[in-house]
Amino acid sequence: MTAPGIVIVGAGQAGVQAAEALRAGGYEGSITLLGDEPHGPYHRPPLSKAWLAGEMDAAQLVMRAPEMLARKGIELRTGLTVQRIDRDAKTLQLADGSALPYTGLVLATGATPRALPLTGGHAAGVLPLRSRADASAIAERMAVCIEQDLPIVVIGGGFIGLEVAATARKKGARVTVLEAAPRLLGRVLAPVLSDWYASLHRSHGVQLMLNAQVAGIEADANGVSGVKLTDGSVLPAGLVVVGIGVVANDQLARDAGLACDRGIVVDACGRTSDPAIVAAGDCTARRLADGSLLRLESVQNATEQGKSAAAALLGQDRPFNATPWFWSDQYDRKLQMAGLSTGADAWAVRGDMAGGSFSVYHFQGDRLLAVDSVNAAKDHLQARKLLDAGVSPTPWQAGDVSFDLGGLLK
């Protein structure tokens, strides 16, 4: 077996950040980065947008080339699956039959798209979007649909579903989005912004069906042919993209006896219930000071948790408590979100919604919780400063474009 060092399971954003932070932090032992895909680390956000649209090539998708990692003394091993963690022996059992010892272990195993639990859900042409292979398969099937004028159905009106819908429309496909809830992005956006996004997609020719209940998938010799709804109607489809959320990849940790609850439970520094094991990224659920758990799925979270996890293995405290932020690109509109709007009971709109450049400020009582900005980058950056500082404008101040919100920080 290889001499023990730090092993990182997962070669995505969190895993790469942890590896590089270990080296930057002065760790001189071996670092092994394990990925279960055949590719090296790559950027996931473009998969539903530029990559799917054919506007980005494979070289542009690369996050870190293997030779770049090698120069930092990070060994990248791809196409490998870890079957078991032996915590007593501090050894990983790999699917190829080999064993890999560790002195410290980083779990950055990511998440898996929820499968459609319905008849026909595994038919050819019913596809999720998480990996480069997924995006390539969707792009290939989408091209056939455009050539043969076959409709595309997207199940799920969340960010992934809407980004795919926007990309497909830009390429000329006919698209229907099915959302089980009464509005789009209902878990994360205020009703006024949900309605704005519904209007945006309809203005680009997307057919939206809210409160839609899917009964099953119909297929023929060529794969998926339609989506059947509970009212008995069938929507023709040459491609069905499923975007109904993800499940944290925490089974490896569960089997090893680590604390898990809809993800690997970690503290603000990425520590798990085993002092030799840390975790970062979409596979985690962070324990907050009040005892509740927070799951975040974002590049920022993966990046910062990766750095915090590396610091923890080096015996340092680097808690990640910054204001969370996210983004989504749909058509020519960029949504930038700062903070978490859960629990908001009041909202204020700043800017011109009709003109397409505005921000929605979420409040709980007098406290600012979050700000969602559309084509308003200045508002977004200012919102992050306000939230980091714990400074709340009043709803009236937030909604008045003539009021200088930056002055509240002085």
Image (spheres, helix red, strand yellow):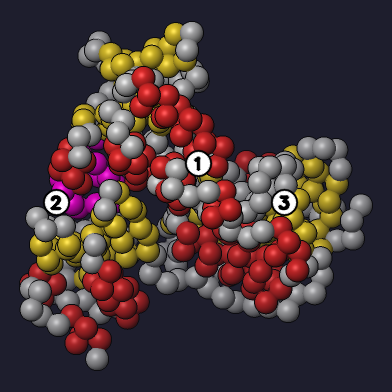
Alpha carbon separation for disc pair 1 and 3: 18 Å
Which of the two marks, 1 or 2, is nearer to us in this view?
Answer: 1
Question: As shown in the figure, which amino acid type bears the numbered disc 3?
Answer: Leu
**Residue found at the very far right of the displayed protein:** 1
Measuring 26% from the left and 53% from the top, which residue is drawn there? 332
The spot of residue 100 in percent (x, y) is 84, 51
* Precedes in sequence: disc 3 or disc 2: 3
* Precedes in sequence: disc 1 or disc 3: 3
Residue carrying label 1? 130
Question: As shown in the figure, which amino acid type bears the numbered disc 1?
Answer: Arg
What is the count of numbered marks?
3
**198 left or right of 104 in image:** left
**249 left or right of 239 in image:** right
Task: Label 2, secondary structure: give it.
Answer: helix
For the stretch drawn in magenta, the main secondary structure is loop
Tell me: residue 218, above or below residue 134: above
Label 2 crowd bin: few (<14), some (14–19), many (20+), radius 10 Å:
few
Residue 145 vs residue 125, the one in the foreground: 145
Task: Label 3, secondary structure: give it.
Answer: strand
**384 left or right of 92 in image:** left
What residue range appears in magenta?
181-196
As for residue 272 lying within the magenta part, the answer is: no
Question: As shown in the figure, which amino acid type bears the numbered disc 2?
Answer: Val
The spot of residue 78 in percent (x, y) is 72, 47
Residue carrying label 3? 34
The spot of residue 143 in percent (x, y) is 42, 29
**Is any atom of residue 114 visible in this view?**
no
